[in-house]
Image (cartoon, helix red, strand yellow):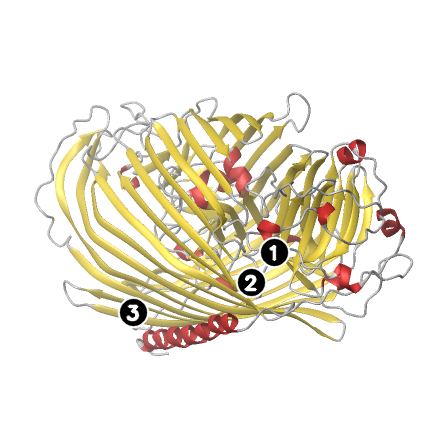
Amino acid sequence: MKPGELHYFFLQSLLLIGSVMLMFIYKPLRVNALAVRVAEIPVSNQQLLPQETITRSLAPVREICSFNQIEHPLIDNQKLVQSSPIPTTSTEVISVTGVKVNSTNKGLEVILETSSKSERLQVTPKTEGNSYVADIPNAQLRLTSGNAFRQSKPVPGISEVTVTNVDANRIRVTVTGEALAPTVELFDSNEGLVFGVTSTTSIAQQPVPLQQKPSSSENQAPIELEVIAPPDTGYNVSNATTATRTNTPKRDIPQSIQVIPRAVIEDQAADFSGEVLRDAGVQRGGLPSRNTDNIVIIRGFSVNNNNFLRNGLRDNIFTGGGTTNLANIERIEVLRGPASVLYGEGTPSGAINFITKQPLQQPYYAVQFKVGSYSFYEPSFDLSGPLTTDGKVSYRLNAAYRSTDSFVDFLHEERFLVAPVISWQPAKDTRIVFDADYQQVQGISSNEIGLPAIGSVLPNPNGKIPINRYLGEPTDTAKRTIGHIGYDFEHTFNDNWTLHNAFRFEFGRNPYLLSALPLALRPNDRTLTRQYSTSLEIDNNQYNLDTHVDGKFKTGSIQHQLLAGVEFYRFLQFHNQGFSQTIGTLDLFDPEYGQKPGAIIPGSASNRKTRNDVAGFYAQDLIALTNSLKVLVGGRFDLVEIYTENLINSLVTDQSDSAFSPRVGIVYQPLPPVSIYANYSKSFTQAIGTDAQANPFKPSRGTQYEVGVKADLLNQKLSTILSLYQITYTNLTTPDPNNLLYNIQTGEQRSRGVELSVTGELAPGWNIIGFYGYTDARITSTTDNRYRVGNLLNNVPTNSASLWTTYIIPRGSLRGFGGGLGVNYVGDREGDLQNSFHLPSYVTVDAALYYRRNDVSIGLNFKNLFDLDYYESANSNLRVYPGTPFEVQASLKWQF
């Protein structure tokens, strides 16, 4: 495709997709909901219940009857246990789109909502200790807010209710009693399959025969619990969407992926994503963790802006811009290794997907206040619930304000976030979510933070530079306003096929960035030369439209889960103006601030605009050859164009490229909880420029080979992944030895390593998340005289490990008290590609104390408990970033 053609192709495709979307949205509004027929329930003696009894409709959410008010015969749970599931000739997998939990006089009801055919659900129940466990082998859980449901302590006598996906076509319902296993009865309704649970407390208080209908009270108002529970203490998330764009069990994915749930963010009192990303093996890149989240490293390679996602769409402005606020983040999914097969252009490091909080169908209100060291304070609130009596429209609203100083002199930052979400279900099979974000960030830019290597990690005859030393001026400042608005549309044709369409518009406005930047350290090792940089009107817009369909079908005995889609993306930077000025030097050991910028440096003025267009077409098939053998095959073809115009000299560059990115993986499960996998995948990154013969550079390519084993232990409450990989990054630009004014594409880097991750629950109330990584990342080919073949890649430790664990006393007089302990180890790293200096290894320790009872949560977190001096990362010999000293943070949260 010629330069400029992709521009028009993008606009035409946008109009076409929008027209198709209007047709889908309009159609459900004109069609009445189909009546759902609920078939008879077979019991152990093969008798059928009366049709008119079991097809009785339940009322809407706010009017649903209590269990003792539903007129239908009850089925003896013991008979169900003794009976075998009724075989069926149907091999279809039925979608469970919602889970409801309602209290009753006897205990509670758990309702699995299905669009149709709930009578075909095959239930295989059993009792394990004090838990009732029911497996449904022909169903898949597809909740709007995630991939698992959990409700702790819903009624007296019941400690927990969970509904999770065991694999691609099996659901497990677990109801755990506090002392004994509860009694459970099954029946159908026009909403779905209903589990009627009698708690052990109810049995003790009301020894009514199981077949006897309990008396009802007309004056008793039904109590409804959260349909989608607010953040709980669970660490293990069984499913993930980032690796396949579908809600797939992690064990079926032939690639390493780790999920950081909201519970970890809450337990660690994390203010920035870097504080929890280290639990998934993500290392710091060339900027400090407290001021930017976007410079990170996975498997030896940097994660560039295209590798950051928000709800599955690339996000260059929020997360890629390093201004993520965790107040409205539900979980973070970290995919290790190339992700171009689904998301297009990006380095071979991996992808980081931030999943935001979604509306709940029951009222949920939470107010939180955090206060801590360095004048830190942050009030926030989280509100959610239905907006209509029928529950078809619900909302969520998160807002937070943060003000904080830093251990670095003069550094102060303020952030404000408001994030509304509206969910609308105009028809039973159609749902659309509208969401928005608006955030303001003001304070000193991270460009001025950091210290020269001489005086920090290298000796300096003048002594050690204090880690609080600021290299700029107290008047330096930066401001940024960012926001987005978009929608996520989903239409289910039947239990097997679903259409997804999502659009997001984002903007970023940087009205000014004023800063004094270091240039060089003079021979006396104490005088720093600087220049003053002024950036004005840096304005960015981003448009992202993705449409895909996923469905399940069979060819003979082979089951397929197909995904096919198209993505159109545009990034516009329509103002980028700036210039540099002279400014006086700074004595690092006796600084005198207050210097004013001088004359504009000739040739430093810049003013340009940029347009980046992408059209990507992708397809993927997850093939189940047998129940224990699965193959994943996929590929994506991308057309990319980047257009840049220098508004000062009218110089224009316009470069178009195309690339195909495949992935092939295989998963073998010798036992249901164990998966052995292997994969081959490729990525691409556009390389801008030409060689000496004016030939445009080809895209840089990343190639990964990976093998590993995954295991779900302790009744699937603990998940582990052990992986071995090799990634080769080729077509990197390096100086042309025959013409130093140009580059050639013979550069190559390689990373090899071993990783071990663990996430989940070791025992009731005892959670853990951890990671160990061995990484050998180095240059394998270059013509650049500054580097040598064999040099290690900068900021990549050979060995790194992290471990965070918490324990909350689950019962007894001390119930709700607990604590947490974390250890983070980062080995020696090179500070630059020349390997001219290295950063020493370090070990930091974090700790926490908790009290969580009823609706109140109190936390006290200690970060860098032993006040260790350490250095996180570096991007040059003038930019070595010290870590934050000891700090303490207290939090109070009230849910009502």
Distance, label 3 to label 2, CA atoms, is 32 Å
Residue drawn where x is 43% and y is 74% of the image: 17
- Check residue 706 in the rendering and tell me which mark sits there, or answer none: 1
Question: Is there a contact, CB below 8 Å, between mark 2 and mark 1?
Answer: yes
Residue 571 at what x, y percent from top left? 33, 63
Q: What residue type is labelled 2?
A: Ser
Identify the residue position indicated by label 2 in the image.
Answer: 681
Q: Can residue 510 be seen in this view?
A: yes
- Check residue 692 in the rendering and tell me which mark sits there, or answer none: 3
In the displayed structure, 286 sits above or below 843; it is below
Residue 132 at what x, y percent from top left? 78, 43
Q: Can residue 619 be seen in this view?
A: no
In the displayed structure, 520 sits above or below 890; it is below
Instruction: Tell me the SS state at disc 1.
Output: strand
Q: Which of marks 2 and 1 is nearer the N terminus?
A: 2
Residue in the foreground of this view, choosing between 464 and 850? 850
Residue 398 at what x, y percent from top left? 42, 44
Q: What residue type is labelled 1?
A: Glu
Residue at the front extreme of this rendering: 218
